[in-house]
Amino acid sequence: MINKIQPKTLSGFMELLPNEQVLFNQMVDKIRASYEKFGFLPIDTPVIEASEVLLAKAGGETEKQLYSFTKGDSNLTLRFDLTVPLAKYVAEYYNQIAFPFRRYQIGKVYRGERAQRGRFREFYQCDIDVIGDGELNIINDAEIPAIMYTTFKSLGLENFSIHINNRKILNGLFEAANVKEKSVDIMRTIDKIEKIGKETVIAIFKDDYNMTEESINTIVNFIEIAGTTDEKIEKLQALDIENDLYKQGVEELKEVEKYIRLFSVPDENFEIDLSIARGLDYYTGTVYETFLNDYKSIGSICSGGRYNDLAGYYTDKQLPGVGMSIGLTRLFFILNDIGLIKTDKKSISEVLVVSMVEDLSKSIEVANALRNAGINAEVYFDNKKIKAKFKYADRLNVPYVIVIGEDEINSGPLTIKNMQEGTQEQLAVESIIEKLK
Amino acid sequence: MINKIQPKTLSGFMELLPNEQVLFNQMVDKIRASYEKFGFLPIDTPVIEASEVLLAKAGGETEKQLYSFTKGDSNLTLRFDLTVPLAKYVAEYYNQIAFPFRRYQIGKVYRGERAQRGRFREFYQCDIDVIGDGELNIINDAEIPAIMYTTFKSLGLENFSIHINNRKILNGLFEAANVKEKSVDIMRTIDKIEKIGKETVIAIFKDDYNMTEESINTIVNFIEIAGTTDEKIEKLQALDIENDLYKQGVEELKEVEKYIRLFSVPDENFEIDLSIARGLDYYTGTVYETFLNDYKSIGSICSGGRYNDLAGYYTDKQLPGVGMSIGLTRLFFILNDIGLIKTDKKSISEVLVVSMVEDLSKSIEVANALRNAGINAEVYFDNKKIKAKFKYADRLNVPYVIVIGEDEINSGPLTIKNMQEGTQEQLAVESIIEKLK
């Protein structure tokens, strides 16, 4: 006897049973349909790229997590996001692309992170970006949240909020308060305000960062801004911060707010959140994070923003863009965990055709008719006891079973059983097709 | 100035422009829909597996082409097909799977082949397999060609033929002729019969393989079998070869033929082809190859067959199966090359909304209405000349453009232009929705 190899999937790699895969694929389909509803074009880039190309920009944390290797005399790396491949793509095919270039890409990316529950080393990203050639209208910054809204609604989620900010406001504020070089620390401290309290934050500003009282006041007045979206914008304007970047940021935020409403995103699904910054060197304008209101601790489930320069490492062309990304593998894992996967269809087959007699001709004929009418149907071929056949139907989650016996073969009506309700009726094939369509 | 990195995609990796990607994705969608029509369940396995797991069975040519590397102390390999991952999956989740297990998988696989036109190192395989637990009904062998037929019809192909044989017939024949150990050479020689002629084949049998006259007669009588499907089966039976394996093979082929017709596959789309063998160690019964009749030199575009033992390297369970695979990347490349890509839709957006005025409120409102009705629509946001806007529409291949001017904003009907025909008409939004659905 040969020694058996243990059939084991690597840890950190999600692999689903078919019933779960059906739900996962439905999420992919809905995300894709939402992106296409806004006319985004698909692209598909290789999983493997030349390391030189993929790492033009990388560094720090990301680099440590890479899957890099050599093949022949080539240094290769598995993509770790879909943004760098997009930058390469746009620079490579610049002359063959129509701008603004609206693309989506749904694909797997690879990061060798420390394995832990809910963290994956191979995961799907679902990205959209709009890339302008030299310039890009601010309306695009408002359309992205509209697409987020459409996407999450299509996934059956209700109680979510798209948080919006503008990096120019933050950068302008820090410039105006003369604390530009401390902005990272200040943002990090502000982030903790709910936990440690306003007084402690002020103490840290004063003692640890040596900020002047004027600086501290400017920052504190800013972070105390509250109210509705419109009130926040009024208060941002009222702060009277003499900084062009700040003013431009507030103007952009106001424009984005106006257009988001024109795109019919309800007020309860978006808000201005002056505390979000999304890292510090990539984004240059509007930024987004999206939260499930009842599960805020999960963190953002969809993030993105505006950037000035997509592909500076590859080309001199100025290519500003705005986009967002859903980390689908993690989102599926979380929604599955908290029971928030909404689905209209739990199986691939609509009908399982089961025969009581050995001759399967009639069963195959019925399945042919269903399929020709566009209904997914399967015939159970094995010559087993009826109990085994129905057990199989149960495991498939199939909603209907058609039973074929002697009567049905002698051209009587067919027996169709509703597996959910346990009821059954006698119907001709045509009526069954009518019923299931 | 920073030195720019050249944005270059690796050779042997297909990367399409968006207009081509739209066509490619439609092919994927049609293949998937065909597989699901027969109730096959989706699975998605990792691209990366432990080398030990993936290479349990590999060897020879395949091993040289592998993308293998180490990460930490793990030896990893990118999957080179979807069959080994299926074997791992079925062995790993044996207790959680309902048998017969009907699965499809569409995904990328990796083989570092020598780069040449039409050969890809990263390519999509679209596989279906039915796996039995201990046994598997022969009807499954007839359903596979029915799925091939449905799939290729859905792709708009007409003139194709599914060639079917049974390995038991060949193996039994070689046993009966006492030339079992020379079967590989004999098959290879038979393959050349159209090129080198019958007399030369007989000479090779005699001189190079030292076959007896009786053996040669047995083989020659076999390869001369011709006629319709039914005639071929009659002649196979009439040959009166006293070998159980041979007889079993002929019986199976006869059964498969009977059921293929029950599945409504027309006679012109399948044929018995006694010359196909599909390699020599994996398949054990029915085998398939599929040809475009007008482009036979391309080779088989969809192959597969029956095997006794899917997962013997991982488990003692006997898991017979039957399946087939489409190498989609190559098929797309070929069909695109010979102009056989059939498509109903050349763009993602059905409509581009273009404004003649600066205020885009009405344009966005119209797009919202279209999207809510399920129509993919895009608004052109940039404030450019009308010529630039229509040039963009052309490059998108969008079938309709809606033009919004002052009249339309003052709640008149909208102007919709058919880009293919160059015609235009004035319609209310509701009528446009009606027209496009």
Image: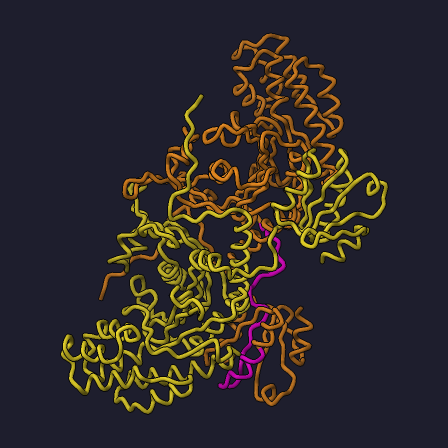
Chain colours: A orange, B yellow
Residue A263 coordinates in the image, percent (x, y) = 72, 40
* Above or below, comparing residue A185 to residue A267 in the picture: above
Q: Position of residue B292 (x, y in %)?
A: 44, 68
Residue B228: x and y, percent? 42, 85
Q: Is residue B361 above or below residue B328?
A: above
Is B400 left or right of A309, judged from the image as shown? right
Image-quadrant location for residue B280: bottom left
In the picture, the quarter occupied by the N terminus of chain B is top left
Relative to A99, is B32 above or below? below
Q: Is residue A47 visible?
A: yes
Q: Is residue A397 left or right of residue B220?
A: right
Residue at image point 18% right, 75% down: B181
* Extent of the magenta region: A339-366
Depth check: A118 or A258 in front? A258
Q: Is residue A155 left or right of residue A330?
A: right
- Residue A302 visible somewhere in the drawing: no
**A193 shown above or below A205:** below
Q: Quadrant of the C terminus of chain B?
A: bottom right
Whether the magenta-drawn stretch holds residue A347 is answered as yes
- Number of numbered discs visible in the structure rendering: 0
Going 46% across and 81% down the picture, which residue do you hit?
A: A383
Q: Where does residue A202 sit, x and y in percent of width and height? A: 60, 15
Residue A107 lies in the magenta stretch: no
Q: Magenta part mainly helix, strand or loop?
A: loop
Q: Quadrant of residue B225?
A: bottom left
